[in-house]
């Protein structure tokens, strides 16, 4: 009986070593290689800023609309009114339009930076997806090797 146990001791030691090596990486949490939280916070801030600029542009548009209505009403009475009043109205329309154009350019710039940040997040997520796919593949390979090793070792123990 003791001879049989001494005969199986090397196999048991090999089995323990093999199992410890195969399961070395099992149940590890996968690494997240990219951190997109800062970029997401930046996108939120830029979105809030873009929305506030849009509100200001809408206010400017309503002011411009009132001035244009005033201009339309007074352009028919040019015979009776002085030209200075029409010139002042036209100048105010031009200044409001230029203000609105600059605000809309700012909205476009903010939208472009938001889109660029979203591209970075998409790229980081694709990198994480590739890494997680490799990690899952490695885990399934380790599981299959462990079952194969246990099957071979169990078969060897049963045969001898």
Image (cartoon, helix red, strand yellow):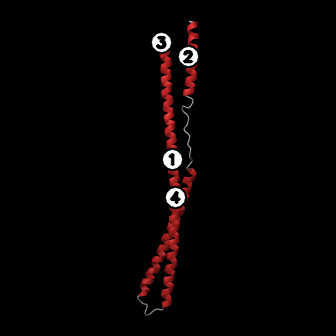
Q: Which residue is mark 4?
A: 114
Q: Is residue 47 visible?
A: no
Task: Tell me the residue at 52%/51% (across/down).
Answer: 121
Q: Secondary structure at mark 3?
A: helix
Q: Is residue 91 visible?
A: yes
Task: Tell me the residue at 53%/71% (across/down).
Answer: 102
Measured in 3D between alpha carbons, the distance from the residue under mark 2 to the one under mark 4, in whole angstroms, is: 61 Å
Contact (CB < 8 A) between labels 1 and 2? no
Contact (CB < 8 A) between labels 3 and 1? no
Q: Tag 3: Cα neighbours inside 10 Å, few (<14), some, or many (≥20)?
A: few
Measured in 3D between alpha carbons, the distance from the residue under mark 4 to the one under mark 1, in whole angstroms, is: 16 Å
Measured in 3D between alpha carbons, the distance from the residue under mark 3 to the one under mark 1, in whole angstroms, is: 51 Å
At which x and y percent is residue 80?
44, 93
Measured in 3D between alpha carbons, the distance from the residue under mark 2 to the one under mark 3, in whole angstroms, is: 13 Å
The N terminus, quarter of image: top right
The earlier-in-sequence mark between 4 and 3 is 4
Task: Tell me the residue at 52%/44% (across/down).
Answer: 128
Q: Is residue 80 left or right of residue 116?
A: left
**In the image, residue 5 above or below residue 59:** above
Measured in 3D between alpha carbons, the distance from the residue under mark 1 to the one under mark 2, in whole angstroms, is: 45 Å
The earlier-in-sequence mark between 3 and 1 is 1
Q: Which residue is mark 3?
A: 159
Frontmost of labels 1 and 2 is 2
Q: Secondary structure at mark 4?
A: helix
């Amino acid at each position: 009986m003791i001879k049989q146990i001494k005969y199986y001791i090397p196999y048991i030691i090999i089995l323990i070593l093999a199992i410890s090596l195969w399961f070395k990486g099992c149940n590890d949490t996968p690494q997240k290689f990219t951190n997109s939280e800062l970029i997401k916070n930046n996108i939120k801030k830029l979105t809030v800023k873009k929305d506030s600029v849009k509100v200001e542009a809408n206010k400017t548009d309503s002011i411009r609309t009132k001035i244009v209505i005033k201009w339309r009403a007074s352009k028919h009475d040019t015979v009776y009114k002085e030209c200075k009043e029409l010139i002042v109205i036209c100048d105010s329309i031009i200044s409001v339009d230029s203000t609105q154009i600059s605000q809309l350019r700012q909205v476009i710039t903010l939208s472009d930076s938001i889109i660029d940040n979203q591209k970075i997040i998409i790229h980081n997520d694709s990198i994480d997806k590739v890494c997680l796919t490799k990690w899952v593949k490695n885990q399934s390979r380790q599981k299959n090797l462990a079952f194969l090793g246990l099957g071979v070792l169990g078969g060897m123990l049963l045969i001898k």
